[in-house]
Image (cartoon, rainbow, N blue to C red):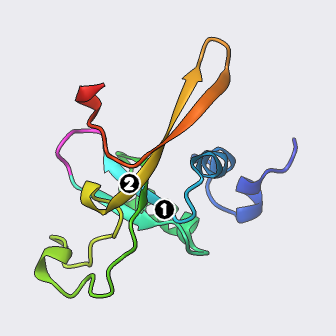
């Protein structure tokens, strides 16, 4: 069996880390934000910044603590974080942690939309949008 990066990283294999890395590369987001979210709507979400060396370890530990949750990624690229972020009460979440910049729509600068022909299994084109479009408006 060929060795893959899951075994190299010594992290439990229930996440396809190579697939995650490829997906992030396709998004062309230099600082992705991951979301550990509950499958039910209106449940709180844990956001994890993806620019740190131990990001995968933090994701794994969070999913082990919350086994009913799933892993996702914020598709948008964040605007520049203000210097005073975290100094205001509205920047603090219900668990008393500073909210992750870039996880809310108002923090998003742009996002890439990939259009794929799944019958032919190939990407057709990607678009860069500078405005957030609600899914209900497609």
Q: Which mark is residue 36?
A: 2
Residue that sits furthest to the right in the current view: 2
Q: What residue is at 41 percent from the left and 52 percent from the top?
A: 110
The quarter in which the N terminus is drawn is top right
The percent position of residue 113, horizontal first and vertical second, equals 48, 37
**Secondary structure that dominates the magenta span:** loop
Q: Position of residue 8 (x, y in %)?
A: 77, 61
Q: Which quadrant holds the C terminus?
A: top left
Q: Which mark is residue 11?
A: none
Marks 1,2: beta carbons within 8 A: yes
In the image, 44 versus 11, the foreground residue is: 44
Magenta residue span:
39-43
In the image, residue 136 sits, relative to residue 77, either above or below, namely above
Q: Is residue 73 visible?
A: no
114 magenta-colored: no
Which residue appears farthest toward the left when viewing the image? Answer: 89
């Amino acid at each position: 069996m060929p060795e893959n990066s899951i075994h190299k990283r010594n992290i439990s294999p229930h996440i396809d880390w190579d697939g995650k890395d490829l997906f992030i590369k396709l998004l062309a987001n230099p600082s992705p934000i991951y979301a550990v979210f509950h499958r039910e709507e209106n449940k709180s979400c844990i956001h994890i910044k993806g620019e740190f060396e131990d990001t995968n370890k933090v994701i794994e530990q969070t999913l082990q603590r919350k086994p009913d949750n799933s892993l996702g990624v914020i598709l948008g690229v964040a605007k520049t974080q203000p210097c005073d972020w975290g100094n205001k009460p509205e920047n603090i979440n219900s668990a008393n942690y500073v909210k992750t910049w870039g996880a809310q729509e108002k923090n998003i600068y742009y996002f890439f939309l990939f259009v794929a022909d799944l019958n032919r299994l190939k990407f057709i084109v990607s678009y860069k949008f500078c405005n957030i479009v609600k899914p209900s408006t497609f």
